[in-house]
Amino acid sequence: MTQSPYEIFIEECPEVAERFNDLIKAQQSLEGLDAKTKQLINIAIQTANRNVKGVQMHAMMAKNEGATREEVVGAVVLNLHHSGFASVLDCLPAAIDGFEGKFLTSKRV
């Protein structure tokens, strides 16, 4: 059975997942930045943390909010001088996959 890590999180920790979703909703409602910009910032943050799956998911969400492929790639490459070449190399393929609708999954054993 193939499930995403997030699906496993929801299944294994439903109460914590519900609270996490409440936090996400509160963050999304913050004013000052449009939804596309928030997603591009999330891509940059996830790249800095070398969170490949996070980059992939936020790239998909950024596209849904109107981001271009160039904007998504730019959010990853912005990290070159902050978090290093390795972060960019780890995350750039995931950003492009997420933008193109290709998703990494975890196989649950």
Image (cartoon, rainbow, N blue to C red):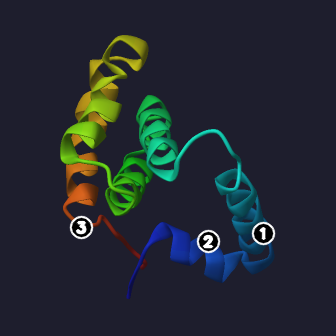
Answer with left or right where residue 65 lies relative to residue 10: left
Tags 2 and 1 in contact by the CB under 8 Å rule?
yes
Residue at the image point whose x is 34% and y is 52% from the top: 59
- Whether 102 is drawn above or below 51: the answer is below
Q: Amino acid at mark 3?
A: Gly
> Label 2's element?
helix
Q: What residue is shown with label 2? A: 9
**Mark 1 closeness class: few <14, some 14–19, many ≥20 residues within 10 Å:** few
- Residue drawn 45% across and 29% down? 48
> Of marks 3 and 1, which one's residue comes earlier in the chain?
1
Q: Secondary structure at mark 1?
A: helix
The amino acid on which the numbered mark 2 sits, given as a three-letter code, is Phe
| Residue drawn at 34 percent across, 60 percent down | 60
* Residue lying at 33% horizontally and 55% vertically, measured from the top left: 66
Q: Residue at the far bottom: name it.
A: 1
Comes first in the chain, label 2 or label 1: 2
Q: Position of residue 26 (x, y in %)?
A: 75, 57
Crowd rating for badge 3 (residues with CA inside 10 Å; few <14, some 14–19, many 20+): some
Label 2 to label 1: alpha-carbon separation: 9 Å
Task: Report x, y in % for residue 62.
Answer: 38, 53
* Left or right of 43 on screen, residue 28: right
**Residue marked by disc 1:** 16
Where is mark 3, residue-wise? 101
